[in-house]
Each structure stands twice: as structure tokens, then as C-alpha cells.
Amino acid sequence: MNFLILGIILVIVAWFILTYNNFVNLRNRVKNAWAQIDVQLKRRYDLIPNIVETVKGYAKHEKEIFENIAELRAKAMGATSIKDIGESNNQITGTLKTLFAVAENYPELKANEEFLKLQEELTNTENKIAFSRQFFNDIVMNYNAAQQKIPANLIAGMMNLKPEEYYPVDEAEKGPVKVQF
């Protein structure tokens, strides 16, 4: 009888340890996924001034766009919450689209090798950001789901774990894509 009670206690302790370690692992994966987004956003922030300076040389009268990009970049770099970082970077994405649309009006700029190189680097960075956001949201989903499942939710409650926020998607990107010919 004592071995049975001891066996049950050992199983419960082992389950507790495994569940606790799983939460620690998931929490660290969320932090790592966020760090990967942070790396790509830093790269984006570093590229933006170079692109702006290159375009400025050709489109001097587009002052409002340049000021807007600088303001949004500063706001994004100062953001601290996932929601604020996501929203400010979604605004940067929209403004960069405007900047590249302006560049279309300057054939000599479109032919500039430095501009094309910077545009390609930014496009690659945007793709990496999109992938990192998707990966982050997948990890957050796993972490949040693990906290809600019975009986692991008991340990999550004891650890005072809270669900993580997903990286937000720009509301404009959720709607249907308008195609014109």
C-alpha cells in the first residue's frame, strides 16, 4: 500500500516537473521569437534612413513623406508593448509603400543602382519580418493553449502565467485585396 501511495506521489511530482519545464520552454520560445522580430525590425530601422536619403536626392519636394517616415520610425523605435510596436510598424509599412510609389515618378531614381539595392534589401527584410511575425504568433498560440489545457492550467495558475499578446495585423490588410486592370 505504501508503494502505491509513493508511486502516485512520484507520478504527480514527475508530471508537475514536466509540465513546469514545458511552460518554461514555451515562455523562452516566445521570448526568442520576439527577439527574432526585434532583429528584423532593427534592420528595417537601419535601412529606412538610407532609402530616404537616396530618394530625397531625386524628390526634394516630397518633404511630407520624409518627415512622416522619420516620425513613424522614431515612434516605432520607442514603442515598448507588442501592440504598440505592431501598430507603429504597420504604419511604417504603409508609408514605405507611399515612398516607393513616389519613386515610380522618377525614372532616374528607379535606375539608380544604390536605390535598387536598398529597395531589394528592404523587400527581403519585410519578408523576414512577415515570417518572424507568423512564427511568433504560432509560438504564442502554443504557449497560450498550453496554459488553458486541463490539468496543466493548474500549474499555469500557480506560476501566475498570463497569455501573451499576438503580433497585431494592420486592419487594412485584413480586408479584400482590390485588383484593378
Image (cartoon, helix red, strand yellow):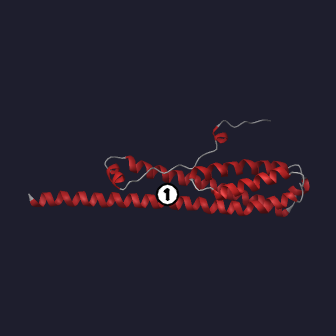
Residue 23 percent location from the top left of the image: 39, 57
Residue 123 percent location from the top left of the image: 72, 56
Q: Nearer the viewer, residue 166 or 127?
A: 166
* Horizontal relation, residue 52 to residue 73: left or right: right
* Horizontal relation, residue 166 to residue 161: left or right: right
Could you tell me which quadrant the N terminus lies in? bottom left
Q: Residue at x 74, y 62 (%)?
A: 47
Q: Callout 1: helix, strand or loop? A: helix
Amino acid type for the residue under numbered disc 1: Val
Q: Is residue 30 depicted above or below 180 in this figure?
A: below
* Horizontal relation, residue 76 to residue 137: left or right: right
Number of numbered discs present?
1
Residue 116 percent location from the top left of the image: 81, 59
Q: Quadrant of residue 37?
A: bottom right
Could you tell me which quadrant the C terminus lies in? top right
Residue 30 percent location from the top left of the image: 49, 57
Q: Residue at x 79, y 48 (%)?
A: 98
Residue, disc 1: 30
Q: Quadrant of residue 108?
A: bottom right
Q: Residue at x 73, y 58 (%)?
A: 122
Q: Dot 1: few (<14), some (14–19), or many (≥20) neighbours within 10 Å? A: many
Give the residue at the far left of this rendering.
1
